[in-house]
Image (tube, rainbow, N blue to C red):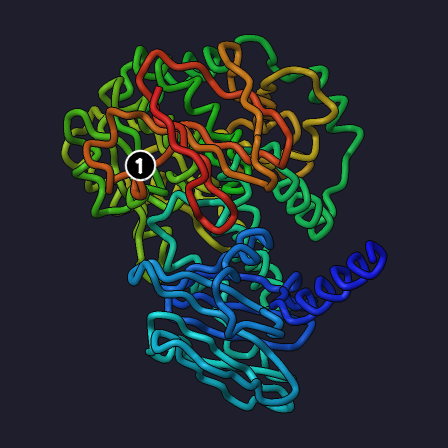
Amino acid sequence: MKHLTSSLLIVLLILVNSCAPKISKYAVYNKMIENQYTHVINDSIEAHIALYGDYKPILEPKNIQNSFKNKPFLKKKEILFYATNTVKKDAELYITISDEPLEFKKLPSNVSIDDTLAGQNFITFIKINNSEVPFNRISLNDDYAQHLPTVIDVVQNTSSSNKYLKILNDINILSEYDKDNNWQNLQYQLTYASFLGENNPYYRTGLKKLFKKFSPTINDTIVDILRQKAMTENVPQKIADIASENQVLMINENHFFPKDRLLLIDLLPLLKEKGFTHLALEALTESEETKLNQANAHPTQKSGFYIREQHYANAVRLAQKLGFKFVAYESENEDRENGQAENLYDKTWALNPDAKVIVWAGLSHIYEKPNQGKKYLATLLKEKYNINPLTISQTQLVPYEKHLDATYALIEASDINEFKKDYTDYLLVNKQTQNLLHSTMFKNIFNEEVQLSLFYVSEIEKAYQLSSRVPYFTAYIDRNHTVKIPSSNNNFLLVIYDKFGNVLEKRTY
């Protein structure tokens, strides 16, 4: 009798399990992007569904399975996708895909069904407490990826967001379907990966692709000259001393290398002592210039695209504290370099002939000689306004970093001008790293990769302002990994984001 009872129980369990809803085997291949719409992409079944943005995807299998409770109408259904609604809190959405129409019996009054035939597949939307059509577009089979947003769409729609891991995740996904713009997409991947700190796998992978594309070669003669002639002691002070006799100091950066901005942080106090009064930033937007020049100002996501990166933002904070006047000089003219030169002159020396200006620019804008017939900002300052800048390039000797031990190495360009590197007065090798001498360890306790960001509480007057603020420290942390975070004497807010932009943790210290 006992044996018979056990057998019956086993049969009942099998029957119950066979009737229970389950997660589709294809669900593991779902990829999500939130960009105006919530895009669900599944390569394994060649499907793309664009849902209205009120729906929030639930990805954790355990949470999806828990949602099946008390929903007998889901019996025998294989769930491809599950989402809740951020506006109608009791609204839920299930999506199934099948090769024939699904049958439903005794549907509750709060449940409605929409299905559509796409190719050979039936897409079924099971809607709870919301009868509205939930999707904007369904694409299947060969053209399923043709109506995805582009990387540019993501960048433009998130220009005021500090959820850098989410943006990078979206860019990485969309880059898989946009092979015609590999170089453009790599630049955005590198930029947003760099916003997460330089010690993360996405940044390292991007750099490998960058160096593979340009294949920099090492000249042993240049290595020898650098080792023999480069200044390596107290370099920031040496730069300040040299610059003291000049009216303008121009230094460039590679936008993909946030460490370049650490030089600016090292230089600002020294240059202030030498009488420098203005800080002209290529990255600063015109509309934000006045705001930053007000007392107690601080950078925001709107200050400028690259100012969203922590080192750049911290340089701006330091300059504001030291009393520098900010200058936005970018130009949208067809002749960009000439427009920049005019803007810079009109906002500084035209108003105060004695102004001493630091210009922080990208790449070749600081070249004092034409290159392939093109005249750059520094060249035009000399020719049009008789202003001879002191120019220092951080970008021309990047491949030589690994051959030098010093934090900084400064050399006169004329010492290696035979190698056509004399577009500027000096060349600099920068191996500076973020100062985390006073720090604490933070472990990622979540079972997923996350973004950790620290914000100054003093910069967040209202809770809604958090999304527009620039963190003073950001790091990528893989699951179960630990990172150093800087200690602070100021009150700060710690926020942990997942790759979908959800806040996993928020604490004030």
Left or right of residue 466, residue 295 in this image = left
Q: Nearer the viewer, residue 113 or 476?
A: 113
Left or right of residue 185, residue 271 in this image = left
Quadrant assignment for the C terminus:
top left
Seen at 22% across and 20% down, the residue is 323
Image location of residue 228, percent across then percent down: 71, 15
Three-letter amino acid code at the position of disc 1: Asn
Q: Residue furthest right?
A: 3
Circle 1 residues within 10 Å: few <14, some 14–19, many ≥20: few
Give residue 349's quadrant in the image: top left
Seen at 46% across and 42% down, the residue is 362
> Tag 1, which secondary structure?
loop
Image location of residue 360, percent across then percent down: 39, 34
Looking at the picture, does residue 377 appear above or below residue 404?
below
Q: Nearer the viewer, residue 365 or 182?
A: 182
Quadrant assignment for the N terminus:
bottom right
Seen at 33% across and 44% down, the residue is 304
Q: Nearer the viewer, residue 482 or 131?
A: 131
**How many callouts does the rendering have?**
1
Q: Nearer the viewer, residue 67 or 489?
A: 67
Image location of residue 235, percent across then percent down: 52, 14
**In this view of the protein, can residue 46 be seen by the observer?**
yes
Q: Residue furthest front?
A: 1
Looking at the picture, does residue 284 appear above or below residue 16?
above
**In this view of the protein, can residue 379 be seen by the observer?**
no
Seen at 72% across and 26% down, the residue is 402
Looking at the picture, does residue 311 appear above or below residue 238?
below
Image location of residue 9, percent across then percent down: 74, 60
Residue with the mark numbered 1: 386
